[in-house]
Amino acid sequence: MNSNSTSDATESHRIVERARDVIPGGAQTGLRAQAYDTGEVAFERAEGATLTTVDGDEYTDYHLGFGPIILGHAHEAVDDAARRAIDGGVLYGAGTAPLEVEVAERLVENLPSIEQVNFCNSGSEATYHAIRLARAATGNEKILKFEGCYHGWHDYVDISVYPPEDQLGEQYPESEGMLSSAVENTLVVPFNDSEAVAEVFREHGDDLAGVIFEPVPHSVGCLLPQQGFLDTVRELTAEADVPLIFDEVITGFRHSPHGAQGEFGVTPDLTCVAKALGNGYPVAAVGGREDLLSQAGGDNKSGVVISGTYSGNLPGLAAARETIDTIVEEDVQGYVTGLGDEYRDGLRDLLADHGIEGRVVGHRSIFSLQFGVSQEPENYEDILGLDEELFREFAAGMRERGHFFTPNPYKRHHLSFAHGAEHLASYLDDADDVLANL
Ligand SMILES: Cc1ncc(COP(=O)(O)O)c(C=O)c1O
């Protein structure tokens, strides 16, 4: 046990109590508030792989802000680049800055589908823009998405991400207050189900504006695309001339600088990137075929409007340029993939040693431990039925021993360039102990 405290008398507890008065739920999102499940948590520092609370308790961070931190927290070169940009002014909001061109050129160079690119500040904005571009190009309204895939909070896509079992196969709105026509126009099928996609094309092919998905859905831990599934979706969309949108908000720059599209050899028409693109700075992009993107090159009186006061803000772009260069020059993905394999192998051995039913899923720098289920999941339905309570107990035990990840059983651990052999050894040692006591 380390000295991490979960006592109610902590400064962390007092901050969270104050927060609950003035911030709904006490945190910026419901998912963030779930960190309270294993105790009150207020953080005030992060460096390398370490996250520190207002009480000075230190944790090895496997949450990494839901994934953006690929190089480690407070990465010196990235932060220096952002600071230099700040010194030259944060935002111009007119014309073009050289940094925009430099980062756009790097995206074109690295991601096979990207011929042109527009910047924005979050993954949700990127998927919103991609869908508008697709609708404008086709003149159609319907979008096809997959159960268990998250593409942001807006009405077009916040549908059937975590549907309850009795809502499988339905268009399940994740939030109250959503526009019913948006929900009706978003069709949903199971991931990895080529036949269901083909059926949608037979029935709605003439009305489809686009197909959007995470090529490796990590919003529910990790689903891996089965052999041929990505190719089938690519063929069906190409035949029907319906834009295929890869949401690479997690996979792009975390799994590979060339995205899942580079890894699996399937090139979409539009691509959304965010998260690891800027190692934590708010920077995102929608890119793709020139004929689709150039619809947005107009004068706001014609074509597609893509807009945003903070789009192309200089610190975000400077962080992105430095992050991309570091990832490419230092083979960050080679390193974090090797480390990910060691965590996954180690956890699988521990489950076997302790005779606990569970599975370790993941890809490259991402992994999840799921209890009460053992077969490799193919789609969202295979995620249902995992033992949520046992995972929360595991998360609480690990947190007491100095390892932080969200106690949400459907989420995932992330690794960064700042994680090393010492973190691996201590994680597996402590996991051994916690699993023995579950
Ligand atoms: C795959 C995917 N797409 C889109 C988004 C939305 O990104 P943001 O939270 O930056 O709006 C997320 C966020 O978690 C995501 O994981």
Image: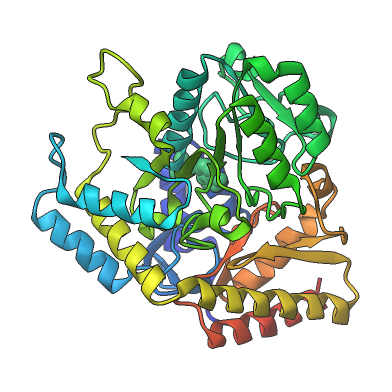
Number of labelled discs?
Answer: 0
Between 351 and 99, the residue placed more toward the observer is 99
Is residue 74 positioned above or below 189 on the image? below
Q: Quadrant of the N terminus?
A: bottom right
| Residue located 42% across and 61% down the image | 43
Q: Quadrant of the C terminus?
A: bottom right
Work out which residue is located at the far left of the displayed protein and give it. 88
Is residue 143 positioned above or below 15 on the image? above
Image location (x, y in percent) of residue 44: 36, 62
- Which color scheme does this rendered protein use? rainbow
| Residue located 16% across and 40% down the image | 96
Q: Is residue 407 visible?
A: yes
Query: On the picture, is 419 further left or further right than 329?
Result: right
Query: On the picture, is 206 further left or further right than 326?
Result: right
Image location (x, y in percent) of residue 416: 48, 71
Image location (x, y in percent) of residue 31: 57, 45
| Residue located 64% across and 57% down the image | 407
Q: Name the image quarter holding residue 81.
A: bottom left
Image location (x, y in percent) of residue 357: 89, 66
Q: Is residue 4 visible?
A: no
Q: Name the image quarter holding residue 110.
A: bottom left
Between 65 and 98, the residue placed more toward the observer is 98
Query: On the picture, is 81 further left or further right than 228?
Result: left
Between 419 and 176, the residue placed more toward the observer is 419
